[in-house]
Image (tube, rainbow, N blue to C red):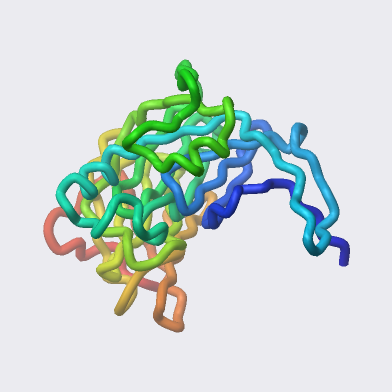
Amino acid sequence: PEHRIAIDASGVGLTGIELNPRDGVSFAVGGSDPYLRIYDVRTLSFSREALGTSASGATPVVSLHSAKPMMARRDRGEWGSTWARSADIGISGVTWRSDGRRLLANYRGGDILMFDMDQSMESCAGGCASEDLPQESARALGNGCVQLNSVQRYEGRDNEQTCAKEVRFLCGGSAVGSGGDCGNLFIWEASSGRLLRKLPADRCVVNCVASHPVLPVVVSSGIDSEIKVWDVGDCRVPLGDGCKRGVPE
């Protein structure tokens, strides 16, 4: 079959992509740098894949970044050198809320951040490049970069061992779910960031999370060979220590 290239990410490995359910034309992309890219399919240019020729580029409609958690790790000396390993940084998963007004980004080496896509966006003067952020990928973004502060943070688990950890809105958007390096499935209250569930879901790492569109049912998978289906009950009700409910079906 014929291949077409819509996006030239300038060497950045892409790990997450999802279409905005509200407009059906914009999609969010996460990759191996701290920039969250949003593209509009109506403005993308296409080219045939040909050996020895580069693809036509596409400038993102908007580019968001919030690298403070990763900067804190760097400042604590948890990296051998600044941005020395691309595997240590980036965004492993992205997802929109069903109304397209909230966007989640699962940061490697950091936490999960939620962005309000209806708030005003301030353009970065001279682009997003700074001494705190990767210069090469920032320059590749061109002039389409804006700064957008997160409206909620979801913390309490590590996201470092794999580059493909997903994040999902659960229970009609009232909760947020993602896996951790510890093998647990974590569920937070979306509005407050409070941890509601911590469920043992894999012997190693939980990478994939999916939610039933109507029922309070969540599916998770990781390194283990089996897929687990969970009845999480009312995600808004915290269970306290132990998290006895939310057992696999």
Q: Residue at x 45, y 57 (%)?
A: 166
- The answer to which image quadrant residue 79 occupies is bottom left
* Residue lying at the far left of the rendered structure: 241
Residue extending farthest to the right is 1
Displayed quadrant of residue 181: bottom left
Which one is in front, 206 or 9?
9
Picture coordinates of residue 43, whole percent (x, y):
75, 32
The residue nearer to you, when weighing 155 against 188, is 155
How far across and down, in percent of the image, does residue 90 sit?
A: 42, 51
Residue 245 position in % (x across, y down): 25, 63
Query: x%, y% of residue 144?
Result: 58, 27
The N terminus, quarter of image: bottom right
* Residue closer to the observer: 168 or 139: 139
Q: Is residue 205 above or below residue 16?
A: below
Total marks shown come to: 0
Q: Relative to 243, does residue 141 appear above or below in the rendering?
A: above
Q: Is residue 193 above or below residue 219?
A: above
One can see residue 25 in this view: no
> Residue placed at 49% from the left, 26% from the top?
127
In the drawing, does residue 240 fall left or right of residue 143?
Answer: left
**Residue occupying the point 39% across, 49% down:** 106
Q: Residue at x 26, y 35 (%)?
A: 192
- The quadrant of the image that shows the C terminus is bottom left
Residue 223 shows up from this direction = yes
